[in-house]
Image (cartoon, rainbow, N blue to C red):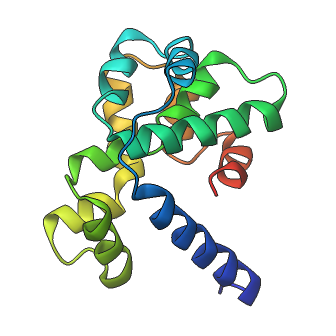
Amino acid sequence: MNSSLEVVTNLWHLVRRFFTSLPAMPPAVKDEVWADDHLLPGERTLWVQLSNRDRRHSIEVAQRFDAARGAASSAEIAGALLHDVGKIESRLGTFGRVAATIIGGRTERFQAYRDHEEIGARMVAKCGSDPATIQLVAEAGPAYPTLKACDY
């Protein structure tokens, strides 16, 4: 059972994510270049399918992860950049994602959104990602607690 602090922290994350999702501007060029430096060609093909909002979020999370992890490998940074890549399969916008979060997986697209970690792990495995990348996208492995802490 979640503690009250965990519930409040998760709610704050969702509220913050909602409001930072509204502007549709792309990531800054320097941030796109930074991301490119850590992605394999197949991973980049997946990553550019994310919305501008999701790419901005993934860069923010990956940069916090890189700073917190210390000596993060490029494969781990790629996992941080791709941690939400499975969401592209749901084809949901901001308001659809809010609905899926609140009411659950009642439709195929809502369920795909809720299963984005498993879906994303399959996607990155298929494009030839390193096992460390796949683990992070699947919310597993020794670096995952750091990624989870950075995804706020």
The percent coordinates of residue 3 (x first, y second) are 73, 86
Residue 47 picture quarter: top left
State the residue in front, 91 or 120: 91
Q: Is residue 78 left or right of residue 43?
A: right
State the residue in front, 31 or 85: 31
Furthest-left residue in this view: 108
The percent coordinates of residue 83 (x first, y second) are 49, 41
Q: Number of callouts in the render?
A: 0
Which quadrant does the N terminus fall into?
bottom right
Q: Is residue 50 above or below residue 89?
A: above
The percent coordinates of residue 106 (x first, y second) are 20, 78
Residue 143 picture quarter: top right
Q: Is residue 116 left or right of residue 132?
A: left
Q: Visible in this render: residue 21?
A: yes
Q: Is residue 84 left or right of residue 28?
A: left
Q: Is residue 41 above or below residue 141?
A: above
Q: Is residue 33 above or below residue 107?
A: above
Residue in view at x 46 percent, y 66 percent: 18
Q: Visible in this render: residue 142?
A: no
Residue in view at x 40 percent, y 46 percent: 53
Residue 38 picture quarter: top right
The percent coordinates of residue 141 (x first, y second) are 65, 40
Residue in view at x 57 percent, y 66 percent: 16
